[in-house]
Amino acid sequence: MQEERKKASEAKQKYRQALFTIRDKKAELIQEKKASDFFIKKSDDLANEGFAWLTANPDADSVQIADQASQTAERYQDIAKANLVLLGLSVLPNFYKTVAADAFLKKQIPEQKKQSLDAFADSIDAWLKTTPQLSTEAIFSKQQEFQTKAKEVLEGTGASTPAVTSTSSVDAVKKEVQAKEEKVKQEEEADRNTFKLSRLLSETGRIAMKVVGSLFIVMLFLVSGMLTANDAIGRDPQYRIFYFIYGGIGFPFMLCYYLYRWFSGTAPHIYRLLPLYSKPADTSLMRFLLFPFTYVEDKAAVDAKTKFMTQAATLVGKEYKPPAEALSNTLGSLVEGIQGLALNSAEAAKIGANSILKGMEKLTVTK
């Protein structure tokens, strides 16, 4: 019995020391920049689980402890292998991009092939960010998938994926990539300093397409804003400015809307780009400058304003009378008042005075 306790104590001490070694190894690899995020997380979890097991099983015998230590060692080996795989994969994106840039510069591959290689490299980088939450099996499986895909994307480049099976080979690939990157940069600089008609035409065409595309978008903005602002001819000028802006911003939808109205025969009448002023300017220069914003108010514009004001008055429970009708009523009140004053009776004079006052109030409102 005493002998068994001694063996259990020795086994615990040995297992505890192994757990401390795992932590020390993690710190060492972090310092050497050879520890992936996956390795840091999983080794921490493994050590913590081991210490937790020792605390939860104080009466475990030497056989149980040895079995637990063996399982921990096997899991650590898998984590260490996965870490090496991740280290190898971490240097490959730059390797693939450098190969693509070099082969494209030498006209060994078309631009589409280069883009395919760059996209493949970016996919590896994106996947590496998710590895801390993955299992070792998922990492080994993904490694095989990347190796198969790499053969496909590297076809025609004359390059192959380097073997990264140890930390020394990973370091070797890093140095190779750095050297090739420097060489590619020098070649690209020399190529840029060399005149090429094809490149000039290509760059000119690219800039021209960009300019034409930008102008086309601006044109669509202006056309859509113009249609919306002219459709609001019955509103006050400040509303037309607002309509012009939101109509231009929403041009994909507004143009479809007005295209439908054009086919249905209800498209708005176009007065100006942004109709704001109905009175012409005094000078030729101002008439020229304000031409896109000055319009001639016709019956359709007056009717549109009358319709809008009538609807607005109805919403608040009031009645809107057009300026001509209001002015007619005002003049009628004034005439009625003058006639009342002309009469000799006091009552008629009083009524006439009231009529004149009401007429003056209406005239003030009409203005």
Image (spheres, rainbow, N blue to C red):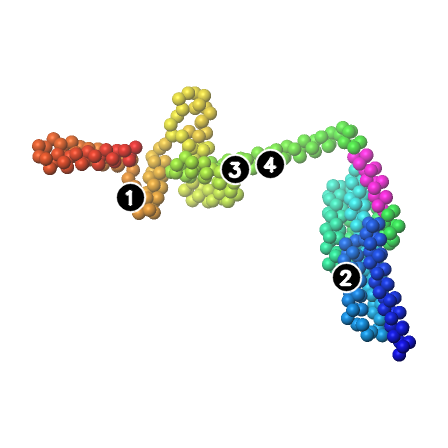
- Measure the alpha-carbon separation of dots 4 and 2: 55 Å
Under circle 4, the secondary element is helix
Whether residue 134 sits left or right of residue 338 in the image: it is: right
What amino acid type should be assigned to the residue bearing mark 2? Asp
Whether residue 10 sits left or right of residue 339 in the image: it is: right
- Measure the alpha-carbon separation of dots 3 and 1: 38 Å
Sequence-wise first label, 3 or 1:
3
Tell me which residue sits at (84%, 50%) in the image: 32
- Local crowd size for mark 1, using a 10 Å CA cut-off: few (<14), some (14–19), many (≥20): few
Tell me which residue sits at (78%, 63%) in the image: 48
Location of residue 308 in the rendering, given as x and y in whole percent from the top left corner: 36, 41
Q: Which residue is mark 2?
A: 45
Residue 213 image label: 4
- Local crowd size for mark 4, using a 10 Å CA cut-off: few (<14), some (14–19), many (≥20): few
**Span shown in magenta:** 173-188
- Measure the alpha-carbon separation of dots 1 and 4: 50 Å
Q: Which residue is mark 3?
A: 221
Q: Residue furthest right?
A: 3
